[in-house]
Image (cartoon, helix red, strand yellow):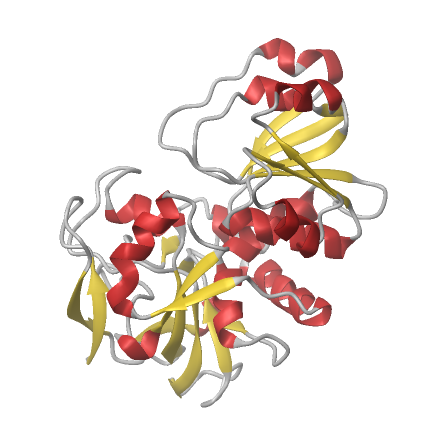
Amino acid sequence: MLTVNAYAAPSATEPLVPTTIERRDLGPHDVLIDIRFSGICHSDIHTARSEWGPTTYPIVVGHEIAGVVREVGPEVTKFAVGDRVGVGCMVDSCRECDNCRKGLEQYCLKGNIGTYGAVGRDGQPTQGGYSQAIVVVDDFVLRIPDGIELDAAAPLLCAGITTYSPLRHWNAGPGKRVAVVGMGGLGHMAVKLAHAMGAEVTVLSQSLKKQEDGLRLGADHYFATSDEETFTRLAGSFDLIVNTVSAKIDLDAYLRLLAVDGTLVNVGAPEEPLSVAAFSLIPARRSFAGSMIGGIAETQEMLDFCAEKGIGAEIEVIGAEKINEAYERVLASDVRYRFVIDASTF
């Protein structure tokens, strides 16, 4: 067993603290990764604070992991020592159900095994990327192309694929009008990706304070949702709306912005239930949907696409001692646009 430094949440109400954890010995198909950077996702905060249900403590969160291969198991053929690699939100699945066989491991019918807060096949709790190293089975390791710096690549493993997957599924591209709700960690990636896919992109944000950034990152239009005139002016305008915020919003108001056959897809996951009036959907055959991350093949496709298009996350790199401060800044929307932890500081 390998002992590594990490930062863990000891309870739902205490700050994260330095600790050590053990990583399993390498199996035949395992890859040992020296973590270089780990992104901070809002999901980390929800989990560390038991906001999405009970959490088993202590827990090491983090599922936006970029690093370098230190060692591989004897039957690993896809990766070699020194390769630049990443790990996202899941580290295994049953690999046998219909969804897994279709490359939709994120929707594994038996439940995928999360990078943290789950139980691995070895019966041990999974611990995430706020640590020096991690051991992952090779089928769930991603190759990070040379065209992306590791620090800017880390958030692609969650924020990138979480927005890429619905944009691809609902065919964002030339001739499509796409709106992105929220200009944060997920939203800024949705803007970059939708623009690179060729769609006409509109940002719907509470205020115009990030308008300059939004236009710089690829948005064609930018509107403040605090202005009631926005919802009148844009009624029936969009083919696809990607809602990235993790707070309760007036879904009916946003659904009315969709054209006939348009879809509003939620990727943000607020703690409380959301309500939808049937007549926000029926008159224009609109759809309200949800989407998770992508499967392994789609995540690799996303990384390759980002390398081809020169896309990385907009990041602020911090040391581990700043994690708790970063959590408060995330909650205050005071980051442009993703915190990334330098793993050398663990």
Q: Quadrant of residue 300?
A: bottom right
Task: Please name whichever residue, 114 or 230, is drawn nearer the observer in this view of the structure.
Answer: 230
Residue at x 25%, y 56% (from the top left corner) = 324
Residue 147 placement (x, y as % from top left): 64, 78
Residue at x 75%, y 33% (from the top left corner) = 239
* Farthest residue, direction bottom: 81
Task: Please name whichever residue, 92 or 318, is drawn nearer the observer in this view of the structure.
Answer: 318
- Residue 74 appears left or right of 77: left
Residue 162 lies, with reference to residue 170, above or below; the image says: below
- Residue 12 appears left or right of 150: left
Point out the image quarter for the C terminus.
Answer: bottom left
Residue 246 placement (x, y as % from top left): 44, 37
* Farthest residue, direction right: 175
- Residue 98 visible somewhere in the drawing: no
Point out the image quarter for the N terminus.
Answer: bottom left
- Residue 18 visible somewhere in the drawing: yes
- Residue 127 appears left or right of 212: left
Residue 262 placement (x, y as % from top left): 72, 28
How many numbered callouts?
0
Residue at x 56%, y 12% (from the top left corner) = 277
- Residue 318 appears left or right of 126: right
Residue 196 placement (x, y as % from top left): 74, 57
Q: Quadrant of residue 232?
A: top right
